[in-house]
Amino acid sequence: MLRYDGPFITFLMKLGDMIILHVLWLLCSLPVITAGPAFAALRIVRDEGGSVCSMFFKAFRINFFQALPLGVISLLAGAVIGTDLYLLSGPVQPKGAAGLFMLALTVFLSILYGILMLWLWPVLVTFENTWMGTIKSAYMMAASNWGATSAMILQDLVLGIAAVFSIAFLPQAAIIFLIFGCPLFFVVNAFHIRRAFDRIRENSSKEDEDE
């Protein structure tokens, strides 16, 4: 069980890598506008036999200039949608059909935003494209892999609710989310994302063979 290449030690090493990634993501996201490149770096780090730190900063550097505008746009869009949801559901809650329409529209936009965030960074680090093309490709990936998208939304909602519940009612369990943080969501989504991209690679290989 205590062999260096055994499953138990490998599991502990993976947990350690997640903690390191969380710390690196927090540090690289402190200026706020670099949150996009930090997310992109988190997405590209895989089990490639190298140091987690070196792989993270290499991915951060490679994707910085492409991820930066997407990160700024994502942060601004998220702030606007979040503010609208807060205002419409509380302090300035409008009445009547117009208010219901505005609330429904904001909820719809927040769902579209959440779906975009699931696929944006994996698409960014996988394909070379313009930032607008990356956004379109992210939505295409979400639409063509709707089962995976639905599963990731459900998983992330469960994790998010569990995080809020643990912080509010079970502080002892909240330490899990404080230690592992954002990479925990990426780990649970990685299975679906990798399968989707593996299918694309397989189809591309078959097309090349046919030609």
Image (cartoon, grey):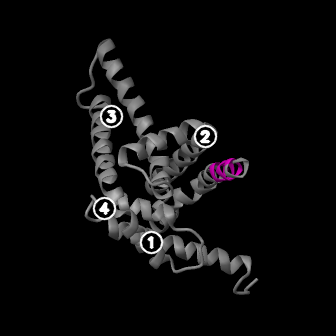
Point out the frontmost of discs 3 and 1: 1
Q: Give the overall secondary structure of the magenta segment.
A: helix
Sequence-first disc among 2 and 4: 4
Look at the image and tell me in which quarter the N terminus lies. Answer: bottom right
Rounded to the nearest angstrom, the CA distance separating label 2 from label 3 is 28 Å
Is residue 126 placed above or below 84 in the rendered structure? below
- Circle 1 residue: 56
Sequence-first disc among 1 and 4: 4
The answer to whether the residue labelled 3 contacts the one labelled 1, judged by CB atoms less than 8 Å apart, is: no
Q: Residue furthest right?
A: 1
Rounded to the nearest angstrom, the CA distance separating label 3 from label 1 is 34 Å
- Circle 4 residue: 34
Point out the frontmost of discs 4 and 3: 4
Looking at the rendering, the stretch of residues picked out in magenta corresponds to: 199-207
Q: Judging from the image, what secondary structure is the residue with disc 4 in?
A: loop
Sequence-first disc among 1 and 2: 1
- Circle 2 residue: 145
Rounded to the nearest angstrom, the CA distance separating label 1 from label 2 is 27 Å
Amino acid residing under circle 2: Asn
Instruction: Count the numbered circles shown.
Output: 4
Residue in view at x 36 percent, y 48 percent:
131
Q: Is residue 76 left or right of residue 172?
A: left
- Residue 125 percent coordinates (x, y): 47, 58
Residue in view at x 63 percent, y 39 percent:
147
Amino acid residing under circle 1: Phe
Q: Judging from the image, what secondary structure is the residue with disc 2 in?
A: loop
- Residue 179 percent coordinates (x, y): 47, 69
Residue in view at x 36 percent, y 61 percent:
37
Rounded to the nearest angstrom, the CA distance separating label 1 from label 4 is 14 Å
Amino acid residing under circle 3: Leu
